[in-house]
Every structure is written in structure tokens, then in C-alpha cells.
Image (cartoon, rainbow, N blue to C red):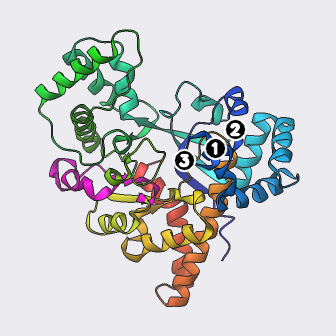
Amino acid sequence: MDLSGIAAIDQHAHNLVHPDVMNSTPYTAAFTEGYEAGIIHHHARSTLFYYRSLREIAQLLECDPTEEAILAQRTELGIEQLTRRCFGAANLKAIYLDDGFLSHTILPMEWHQQFVTVHRLLRIEWLAEQMMGQVNRFEIFLEWFRSELDPPPTGVIGFKSVAAYRTGLDIQPVPIELAADRFYALKDYYGDNQAIRLADKPLIDFLVHEALTIAAHYQLPVQFHTGFGDPDLDLRLANPLHLRPVLENPRYHQAPIVLLHAAYPFTQEAGYLASVYSQVYLDTGLMVPFLSVAGMRRTLEMLLELSPTSKIMYSSDAHLIPELYYLGAKYGRKVLEQTLMQSVRDGDITNPEAESIAHAILWQNAQSLYRT
């Protein structure tokens, strides 16, 4: 089974950063979720992901498999030629970009369009933060927030929440009066001249419920960060089982919920949710390509233990550098191929069924869910 010829949809990734930011950021920062100096400058180079990636990138760029040689070759190629080579080798038919990450340092959506079809994911917390700095009355803020989501802006195919990073996934109903109180408390805390970072649980929970109501009306997917990430999050609160009150709420049954990153290490929990809630979907990003090959394969196997194959979608969660798009696509296909072939040997599926499932996970499920 060879999946290299199947063009994939990367259903969750991020804009690349400007060349000056890319060049001033340590290369190893792209290979770790940590941000302490000791991790970035030392320990990240000792991960299986880094060792494997250097060889893969060097082969793609036709240089020696050392960080120094790769950096020299990247400089010679330039950002556009480097991106074209990575995206071409990744064989992508489309990418869905969350442009709320490092928003002041990223290249615009339009820049990415020269390489591949791009669709936008609108990050809820980022949107609220931009507005909070510009208005002083909660009722005006709320009306503006709703109007920016309803109807969804042109080009937006889904919403995204990073509630897991800020306050956790135990998202509860919040009275509007409490949300207003928290809005004013945040405004007082930050004052008029500071950028606001929204990390207030009642206000985030309230806004997520507002977004879910609108998403349900338009049957628009809502992506939730689940599982591991950088140390900003409390991993215990990123378990998708905390989302049960949202999933049980009949008001939101028409809003597809996409659990990102295979919810690693809560992968079996995520698979269970997808198996019993019709609106729950899963993706593979970040665990592909950050884990070891065995870890990626084992995690995908756990997703497939119980979840319908119609619920699983490929993604890379690529960010910062174009190489992550390439590495994600290469190993996304590799571990999918290995896992499906093992399922054939186990007697779970036939060869034709494996081929059909590969197409579904790599692009068909995303195209159908997001109506692209």
C-alpha cells in the first residue's frame, strides 16, 4: 500500500512566520512544545523527533544531515522556494489555517495561497481579545463579537477554541451578568494601554457558548485544542472528557466538534467520544509528527480501536517553518499505511477497505465536514 500519491487536506495548521522572525528563532524551537532555554537549546536536540527530522529535511533539501548544513541551505533557497519545495513534497490539496497563533508575526493567508488552496479557521479567543482592547462597554463588545461570527466571515470554514490552554475544557453555562462582571474586571486589570490576554474562565466559557450557538445554526465545525501542547496549559484540564456538558447540550448537536491532536495522551478517551457522539470528530495533528514513529502508530491504532473511520482526519498542526508541513504529511501517510496494513493482517478490514479508509482520513472526511 502506497499512500504517497493521495493528495491530503491538512485540516488544522498555522501560518508561517515572517522570514526575519523565522531566522531569529532557534531552529530547534520548531521541534519542541517547550520554551525554556534549556529545552530549546539543548534537550530538544536529543528527541527522536529531532534526530529523524534532520535526516528527512536534509534529504529533501539535498544537503548534509546536520543542523548547520540545513540552515545554510534554507538561507540559500529563501522562504518562498523553501516553502514551495516543502508543500510540493507534502502533496497537499488544501490547508485550513488558524491564524490566531503568533498573529503579529505571521505571513498573511494570501501569501500561502501561491502554494496551495487555503481556508481560514477563526480563533474565538483571539477575536475577543482584539475587540476587548477597543470597547469599554460589555453590551457593545458582545454585540460586536456576535456580529463578527454571525454570519461567519467570508472564507471562514470553522471556529477554533484554545479554552484548553487558558482555563480548561470543563466549559459551563455562565449567566450574562457574570460574564459582564468579568469583562469589566479584565478591563480594569489591563488598563487602556495593554494588550489583553483572555484567561478568565467565566468569560471564556460564556463566549464559547455564544460561538457554539452560532456554529450550530450554520452547522459549522468548531475545533477544540485537546491534549498536549506547550506548558501554558494544565494537561489535566485538556482531557476532552471535560467537554461532556457541551456534547450533551441539544442546542449544539448541529455543531460538529473536532478534537484536535488526537487528544494525546487522552487518545482512547477521545476515540470513545467520537464513537458515541455523532457530532464529535478527531484529528491527528501535533502527535503527527512530534511523537516517535512507534508513538504515532500506537496513537493512531488507539483512535481506530473504537472510533468510526469516518470521524478521523489528517492534520499536522504545522507552524513556524514549512518543514513541519512536509514532515507531518510524510509521517501522517507512513503511520496510516502501517496501521491500516496491520488491520488488514488482523482481519479487521480488507485491502480495498483499507484503500477507501486512507482516502477518507487523508482528505474526504475533511472535505465533507467543512464543505470545501
Q: Which residue is mark 2?
A: 26
Label whose residue precedes the other's in the sequence (2 or 1): 2
Q: Which residue is mark 1?
A: 40
Q: Is residue 288 left or right of residue 200?
A: right
Q: Is residue 105 left or right of residue 346?
A: right
Report crowding for label 2: few under 14, some 14 to 19, many 20 or more residues within 10 A (C-alpha): few
Q: Position of residue 225 (x, y in %)?
A: 40, 48
Q: Of the residues shown, which amino acid type is indicated by label 3?
A: Glu
Q: Position of residue 275 (x, y in %)?
A: 31, 69
Q: Main secondary structure of the magenta part?
A: helix
Instruction: Please tell me whether mark 2 sits on a helix, a strand or a loop.
Output: loop
The residue positioned 29% from the left and 25% from the top of the image is: 145
Label whose residue precedes the other's in the sequence (3 or 2): 2
The residue positioned 33% from the left and 54% from the top of the image is: 236
Q: What span is in magenta? A: 239-263
> Residue lying furthest front in this view?
38
The foreground one among 28 and 72 is: 28
